[in-house]
Image: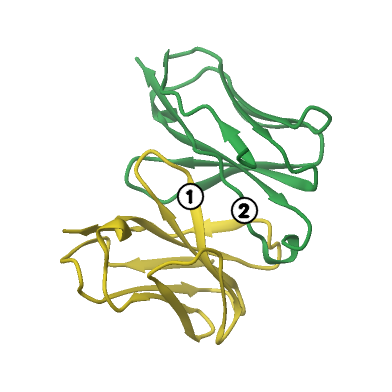
Chain colours: A yellow, B green
Amino acid sequence: SQTIHQWPATLVQPVGSPLSLECTVEGTSNPNLYWYRQAAGRGLQLLFYSVGIGQISSEVPQNLSASRPQDRQFILSSKKLLLSDSGFYLCAWAGTSINIQYFGAGTRLSVL
Amino acid sequence: QKEVEQDPGPLSVPEGAIVSLNCTYSNSAFQYFMWYRQYSRKGPELLMYTYSSGNKEDGRFTAQVDKSSKYISLFIRDSQPSDSATYLCAPIGGAGGTSYGKLTFGQGTILTVHP
C-alpha cells in the first residue's frame, strides 16, 4: 500500500533562517506531488506541484521554492523565512487517478 | 468572487442529528467533487467524491452535486462525536488545469457533534 511521510511534524524557526521540509512517498512510482499551505481557519492553498523529477510548477509567487530530486521525494525550501511563512504545510500525492489526492500528516511551521 | 465558497461555521449539533454541509462554486468546468475530512492538527483525508451531478452514498454519508445551480452538499446521518472535524469540499477541473489534478478547496466547515 502507498504511504506518504512528512517531517518534521512541528518546526519553530526565527525570521531570516532557512527552511527545508521533506516529503516522501512509498508504494507507488511516478506520482504527482503537491505542496499546500493552510493558514489558521482557512482552506488549503496550492503552492507547488510536480509531475516528474525536476519538473516544478509554482502556483503563487512567494518566498518559497520546491524541488523534486527523486521520483518520490518532494522538498519545500526557503533561503530566508518571513513571519508570513508561518502555517500548516501539507504534502500530497496523486497516482493514476489524478483527481484523488492523498495527504501527509503535515508540518506546523511557526516563524518567530 | 472565490471559485469555491463554503460556510466556515462553526456548526455544533447533538449526537444523532442529520448534518448538512454545503459549498457553492463558480467554475462550470468542475467535474469531480471531493469531500475531505480533517481532524485537528492532522492532514485531510478523502471522505468521498462524486463525478458530475447526482448523489453518492457511503454508509452514513451522502454526497450530492447539482451542477445546474453549482451547489455541493454532504449529508451525515446519525452523526457521532467522532465526526467532529473540519470538512473541506474540493471540486476539480477547469480549463487548462484538469490534467494536473489541481484541487480548489473551500474554506472548510468546522463541525462539532456533542454527546
Subunit of label 2: B
The residue wearing badge 2 is B103
Q: CA distance from mark 2 to mark 1?
A: 9 Å
Mark 1 and mark 2 in contact (Cβ < 8 Å)?
yes
Q: Which residue is mark 1?
A: A44
Q: Quadrant of the N terminus of chain B?
A: top right
Type of amino acid under label 2: Leu
Give B34 or B7, whichever is nearer the viewer: B7
Q: Amino acid at mark 1?
A: Leu
Question: Please, is residue B92 above or below residue A9 in the view?
Answer: above
From the top left corner, tell me how far across and down residue B29 is, in percent. Answer: 80, 48
Q: Position of residue A93 (x, y in %)?
A: 55, 65
Q: Residue at image x 49%, y 53%?
A: A45
For mark 2, give the secondary structure.
loop
Please name the residue shown 78% across and 47% down the image.
B31
Q: Quadrant of the C terminus of chain B?
A: top left
Helix, strand or loop for disc 1: strand
Question: Residue A76 at what x, y percent from top left?
Answer: 39, 73
Residue under the point 36% across and 58% down: A106
Residue A74 visible in the picture: no
